[in-house]
Amino acid sequence: MSTHADAQAAQATRNRILALLGDLPPESLTTVEQFVRFLREQARRKRPALTTPAEEPPAFRYPTVAVPASSLDRWLNLIPEGYEGDALADTEALYDEV
């Protein structure tokens, strides 16, 4: 795109923004001013706003921690004696009583 076309596109965008500003209530103008100042500061720091949406991160992230298999030994004998049994048989017995 040529420089002249870029200038025309920028002016058209400015005109659309000014038209939108005319429709805003006065209390919203402060927020718009703060946003414009933020964008100017970002541009000054060479970090302009993105014009394309960024790729969305995955919904969930699970940490992966390498643990040696020997760490499972701590789970042995976690429950004291006397709690042995067959959970399936116990559950079925509950329904047999109903």
Image (spheres, rainbow, N blue to C red):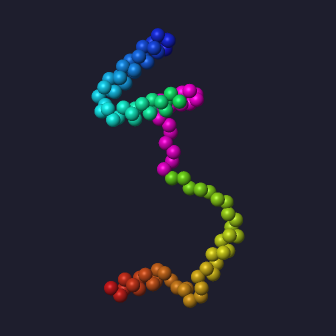
- Vertical arrangement, residue 31 with respect to residue 89, above or below: above
**Principal SS element in the magenta part?**
loop
On screen, residue 75 versus residue 85, left or right, reads right
- Residue 15 spot, x, y in % from top left: 36, 19
Location of residue 8 by image quarter: top left
Q: Quadrant of the C terminus?
A: bottom left
Looking at the image, which residue is at 45% across and 29% down?
36
Looking at the image, which residue is at 56% across and 56% down?
62
Does the magenta run of residues contain 21?
no
Please provide the residue range marked out in magenta. Answer: 42-59
- Residue 3 spot, x, y in % from top left: 50, 12
- Vertical arrangement, residue 29 with respect to residue 94, above or below: above
- Residue 38 spot, x, y in % from top left: 49, 32
Q: Is residue 63 something that shows in the picture?
A: yes
Q: Viewer-proximal residue, 61 or 44?
A: 44
Q: Viewer-proximal residue, 90 or 34?
A: 34
Q: How many marks?
A: 0
Looking at the image, which residue is at 42% across and 30% down?
33
Name of the residue lying farthest toward the bottom: 82
Looking at the image, which residue is at 51% across and 45% down?
57
- Vertical arrangement, residue 38 with respect to residue 97, above or below: above
Q: Viewer-proximal residue, 27 or 86?
A: 27
Location of residue 75 by image quarter: bottom right
Q: Is residue 48 something that shows in the picture?
A: no
Does the magenta run of residues contain 56?
yes
- Residue 51 spot, x, y in % from top left: 47, 29
